[in-house]
Every structure is written in structure tokens, then in C-alpha cells.
Image (cartoon, rainbow, N blue to C red):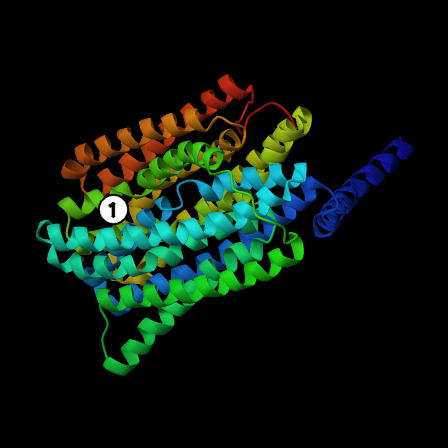
Amino acid sequence: MSEITSANQQDDAGAPRGRIARARRLVVDILRAETDRTLAQRTAVIAFFIRASSAAIALVSQILLARWLGSHEYGVFAFAFVTLVIVGGLLPMGFPTAGQRFIAEYSEAGQTGLLRGFLDGSRLLMVAIGTTVSLLGALGLWLFGDLIDRQYLLPLYLILVCLPAYALMEVQDGIARNYSWIDLALALPYLVRPLIIIAIVGGTMLAAGSADAITGAYALIGAIWITGVLQTLMLELRLRRRVPRVARAFAWKPWVVTSLPIFLVESFYMLLTNTDVLVLSIYESPDKIGIYYAAVKTLALISFVPFAVTAASAHKYAEYGATGDRARLEAFVRDTVNWTFWPALAATLAMLAAGKPLLWLFGPEFVEGYPLLFILVLGLMARATVGPVDRVMNMLGQQNVCALIYAVAFALNLALNFTLIPIFGLAGAAWATSLALIAESILLFFGARARLGLHVFILNGKR
């Protein structure tokens, strides 16, 4: 009996030591990044910490802007900023995501001319598109500006100046991720950019004693152009060391044909996640928009988890698809769903617990948005249960199906916003977004299972 007891004690003592040893080996493997899986884990960890750090900086910056501008001007600034995010996010026409697929394929096949052609041609195209849209947008505002509330008009004019640099950074983000240069992809737009905005607005406050939405728009121009130029110079230096300087070859037709369905996917997703603020501007005052936007920004840390995983994994889906390695693809998909859901769940619980004091930091009136957090997280967590399934489908040739799903989700979101906001106000906007995200997640799950044979859900029965 004493021998059995002694053996049990040894097992109990050994179990923690075994778990600690396994955890230590996991950390060492991730740091060394000797396999595709550990490289992706390390990239995801770096991406998450950059985005988590940027979340803290962004939260502080949004709090300072809300305090400096006041709820009314902050609401005007939020409307202009969301418009920039939507238009700027649509300009790349799917090239950043498609680039992760083409770069992986050309590198695998040794087609250096096409690789160099895509790297250079896609960036020049983004600058040209951004410039064209800026000019057309200015013409449109001049012709139809009377249809827009005048308090929004000048900020909208100013953000048009940002579009060429914004579009360029979007496609360079995709290029940098493909080479696992996650620091170059994320540090400048997500760490440096908000600091520049705060420096400009804060400097204006010190010099003039006040600031408004126009000040914020000028700060956006400075921050986006400074970071855009720096990122371009740094990326070019790294590419010169990585990719041989050969004669460029261009394959515009397959690039555009592949990118357009992805563009539709990203367009509908961009609209899906930002329509609420735009529709709110029709029914609610800038003060209410500011409160809603503060609630959305408070939950930003949760959305950074799937962003980090996607940044680390998208090009690997394309690589495994190109090589036909089904077993590694299925295992990697399961991994990325787990990497998405569990950290997102932890972040959700933390943000709900700390939500009220965080909103109070924006200003006492912003605490009104606290109940919105509990509605908004429903959609975010539903999306986390299927991980980066949309990127899996895009990388494996199912971008058309993905685009159709996002179109349905966007149409549902738009209809719900126009139905619920007039009745429930800010809560209606939150419910519209969450219900649309839940529907989208269900459709993506069934789409991946039907078209790719992949069981993309957190409860997949496999380890």
C-alpha cells in the first residue's frame, strides 16, 4: 500500500514538471521557428503583441482625442476616419491578399521575373489608383457637397489626400507578411501612426488651446504619409536583399482575375464591419456616434487576435494548397482556429470586465456605451469560432463563394441597420452588426465544408 501511495505521489509531482517541460519546449520551438508551424506561431505571437501594443496606444490615443475634441467633434472625426478606412481599404482591389498567394506560388516555382513584376507593379498600381480616386472624390464632393452635412464636408476633403499612401501601405502590408516581416507590416501603421496623430493634435492643443475634427484630419494626413514613405524605403531595402534584380514580367490578367473576387470579399467585409457608423450618421447626432465608436474601439483588442493569426498563416494556406499537402493543410487549419478562438475568448472576458472604467476614461458621457459591449462581442466571438476561414477559402481558390457569402452578410447587415437603428438607436446598430457576423460565420463554415472538405470550427473533435 505504501509503495502504491509513493508511486502516486511521484506521478502527481511529475505531472506538473512534465507540463512545465512541455511548455518550455514549446517556447523554445517557437523562438527557434525551425518548422512552418513554429514559424507561424512565432509570427502570430509577434503580430499579436504588436497589435496588442497598438491596441493600448490606440486606446490611449482615442481617449486623448475624445477628451481634447469633445464628444461632438470626436463623433465628426470618427465618421471621417471610418470613411477613410472603408475607401482606403477598398482601393487595393484585393491585391494584398492575392499577393500572398502569387508570391508563394512564384517563389515555389522559381519564377523570379513574375515575382519581381508583381512586387513592383502592384505598388505602382496602388499609388495610381489612390491618386485617381482622390481626384474623383474631390470632384464628387464639389459637385454634390450640398447633400452632405457641412460639418462632415471639410474632413472628407482632407482625408482624400491620404488615399495614395494608404493604398500603398495596404499592398506593402501583404508583401511584408508573405516574407514573415511582420514588424515591417504592422509596426509603422499600428504603432507609429497613432503616436504621430497624438503628437500633432496634442501640439495643436498646446499651441492654440483647442482642437477639432479638422485638426484630427490634418494629423491623419501627416501620420499616413510619413509612415507610408518610411515603410516603402524599408521594404525596398529588404526586397533587394531577398529577391534577385531580374527583368520584370507582368501577368496582369491572372492577377486581376484572381484579385477581383477577393476584392469583393474584402469590400463586403469592410462594409459589414463599418456600415453601422455610417448609417448611425443618418439617424443620430455626432455625440451619439462618438459614444458608439468609443465602444467599438474598446473591443479592438479582440479583433486583433484573428488579425494576428491571419497575418501569420494566409500564405501558408496557399503554399500547402500549391504543393497538395492535404494533411499539413488540415492540421494547420485546426491550429489556426485554436490560435484564434481561445485568445479571443480570454480577451473578450477581460474587456467586458474592464469595459466600464475604460469607457469612463473617454469621458463620463461615454459610459452610456457599456451595454453595447455585451451585444458586440456576440458577433466577434461567433466569428472567432471558425478562425480565419475566409482567408483559407481565398487562398485555396474559393474566393467567389467567399464573396457571395460576404455579399449576403452585408445585405443582411445593411437591412438590419436601417430597421433596428430607428427603433433601438445605438443598441440597434450593435445588434445589426452582431447578427450579421453570426450569419456570416455559419455560412463560411458550411461553405468551407462543402467546397474544400474542411471542418473549420473550434469544436472539431480532433487535437
Residue in the picture at 40% in, 34% down = 260
Name the residue nearer the viewer: 461 or 91: 91
Q: In x, y percent, where is residue 445?
A: 47, 24
Outermost residue on the right side: it is 3
Dot 1 amino acid type: Val
Q: Is residue 141 above or below residue 257?
A: below
The answer to whether residue 378 is seen in the rendering is no
Residue 82 lies left or right of residue 184; in this view the side is left
Query: Which quadrant of the rendered structure holds the N terminus?
Result: top right
- Reply above or below: 430 against 130: above
Instruction: In the displayed orientation, state which residue is furthest to the bottom.
Output: 207
Q: Name the quadrant containing residue 166.
A: bottom left
Residue 219: which quarter of the image?
bottom left
Residue highlighted by disc 1: 277
Above or below, 339 against 162 in this view is above
Q: Position of residue 439 (x, y in %)?
A: 36, 27
Measured as percent of width and height from the top left, residue 356 is found at: 34, 54
